[in-house]
Image: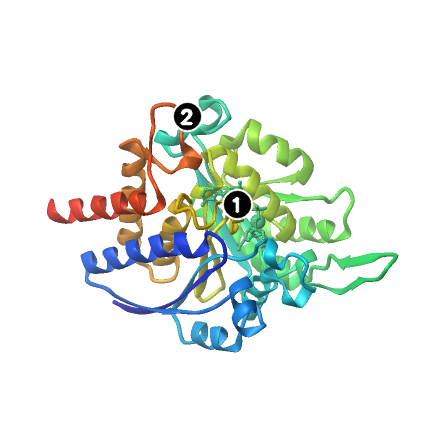
């Protein structure tokens, strides 16, 4: 197979974790005889510095010619006081909207050798296998009007029926090929947009009799997600709630540094990125955990290219390196061996190579 991938390293630890993920991708390509053509583009703060635009036209053009996008992270203190249009985060929001990437899949799975790294009790986290399906191109992030004056500020939370129907449909379809359980998270006791959301879930469930549905309010869900995370299968929710709940869910695995994500649309074109941000305080130190970005590449292979075996091989290699007791600092527990980003990546690549030799 031959594919074009646009890589957008971004800011902070973005370039470091992306470099790791690209080297894993190329190793997998070599092993399975695929050719991945990589083109690099600018996004976020570094694009503002070079082009005075967090999402330059050249970057959009590159992505349009590609089969998938891999992104590191954007943002940092240098740009935090910029006007709204010139913030790094605006570049990310614009690329999601431009490519209509409405469905953001954020899987959270217990990795046996990481159980000790979670501050939660092993019994609570050991059976977790859930998927947060976050609506990504609507809600508060994009609603108009949006205003700021001396005396007040305004953001708009708006959802259309069309936007809710398509994300709810994708979540039902994912639930039916998993364990058949869907939790829809909203704030229907307060928000009109949530009441529309809940109504649409109830309408849709008639078409998916094989899926068990529950509605859950976001505040108590935040509590249950860490007291009983194993109870969840697919969790579908709007943009802002999904953002918050997914970072919370990283506590289950022990670090934000291991959570991957896929932002896809109906034709399976997608942008793949770790759930975490640019972690400015550790940028440049070579200690960031690249696992989330490496696992995001696995999601790209699976969801955009249908390369399920190759994706599973990356997941296996990552788990094997953890199993061997090698971690980056964010996951360190007494007795574990702490490696740099590059060293840890090398272990993953060696793991892939080893299985090649033994084939
Ligand atoms: P963050 O996710 O960057 O960091 C949160 C905490 O997790 C920090 O302690 C950080 O050191 C740690 N961390 C995150 N990823 C890690 C990794 N791979 N390895 C080891 N430790 C890791 O969130 P934040 O500090 O709230 O935000 C920093 C900047 O990132 C902000 O500018 C924010 O807007 C941006 N951000 C970008 C994205 C994105 O590009 N998708 C996502 C979230 C935040
Ligand atoms: C994420 C990030 C982004 C979001 C920010 C940086 C715009 O937190 O991808 O989770 O809120 O969606
Ligand atoms: Mn987030």
Residue 100 falls left or right of residue 123: right
Q: Nearer the viewer, residue 170 or 295?
A: 295
Q: Is mark 1 within 8 Å of ligand 1?
A: yes
Q: Which residue is mark 1?
A: 281
First-in-chain label (2 vs 1) = 2
User: Which numbered mark, 2 or 1, is in the foreground of this view?
Assistant: 1
Q: Residue at x 34, y 52 (%)?
A: 20
Image position of 83 with respect to 140: above or below: below
Q: Residue furthest right?
A: 151
Q: At which x and y percent is residue 98?
A: 56, 70
Q: Position of residue 18 (x, y in %)?
A: 39, 56
State which quarter of the image contains the N terminus. bottom left
> What residue appears at the point 57 percent right and 38 percent down from the top-left corner?
248
**165 over 323 or under it: above or below:** below
Q: Answer left or right for 51 relative to 161.
A: left
| 241 vs 331: above or below | below
């Amino acid at each position: 197979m031959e594919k074009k991938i646009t890589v957008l390293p971004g800011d902070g630890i973005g370039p470091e974790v992306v470099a790791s993920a690209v080297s894993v991708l190329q190793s997998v390509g070599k092993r399975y005889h695929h050719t991945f053509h990589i083109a690099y583009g600018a996004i976020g703060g570094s694009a503002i510095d070079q082009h005075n635009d967090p999402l330059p036209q050249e970057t959009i053009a590159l992505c349009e010619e590609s089969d998938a996008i891999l992104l590191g992270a954007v943002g940092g203190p240098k740009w935090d006081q910029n006007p709204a249009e010139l913030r790094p985060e605006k570049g990310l929001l614009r690329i999601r909207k431009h490519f209509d990437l409405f469905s953001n899949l954020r899987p959270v799975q217990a990795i046996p050798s990481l159980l000790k790294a979670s501050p939660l009790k092993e019994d609570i986290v050991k059976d977790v296998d859930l998927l947060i399906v976050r609506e990504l191109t609507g809600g508060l992030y994009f609603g108009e009007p949006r205003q700021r004056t001396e005396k007040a500020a305004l953001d708009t939370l708006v959802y259309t029926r069309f936007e809710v129907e398509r994300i709810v449909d994708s979540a039902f379809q994912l639930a039916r090929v998993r364990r058949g359980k869907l939790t829809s998270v909203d704030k229907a006791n307060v928000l009109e947009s949530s009441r529309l959301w809940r109504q649409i879930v109830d309408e849709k469930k008639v078409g998916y009799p094989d899926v068990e549905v529950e509605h859950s309010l976001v505040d108590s869900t935040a509590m249950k997600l860490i007291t009983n995370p194993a109870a969840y299968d697919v969790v579908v929710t709007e943009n802002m709630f999904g953002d918050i709940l997914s970072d919370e869910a990283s506590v289950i695995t022990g670090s934000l540094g291991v959570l991957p994500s896929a932002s896809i649309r109906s034709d399976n074109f997608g942008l793949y990125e770790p759930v975490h941000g640019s972690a400015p305080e550790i940028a440049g130190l070579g200690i960031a955990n690249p696992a989330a970005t490496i696992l995001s590449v696995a999601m790209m292979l699976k969801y955009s290219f249908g390369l399920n075996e190759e994706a599973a091989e990356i997941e296996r290699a990552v788990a094997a390196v953890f199993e061997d007791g090698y971690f980056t600092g964010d996951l360190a527990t007494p007795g574990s061996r702490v490696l740099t980003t590059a060293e840890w990546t090398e272990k993953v690549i060696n793991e892939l190579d080893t299985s090649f030799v033994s084939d």
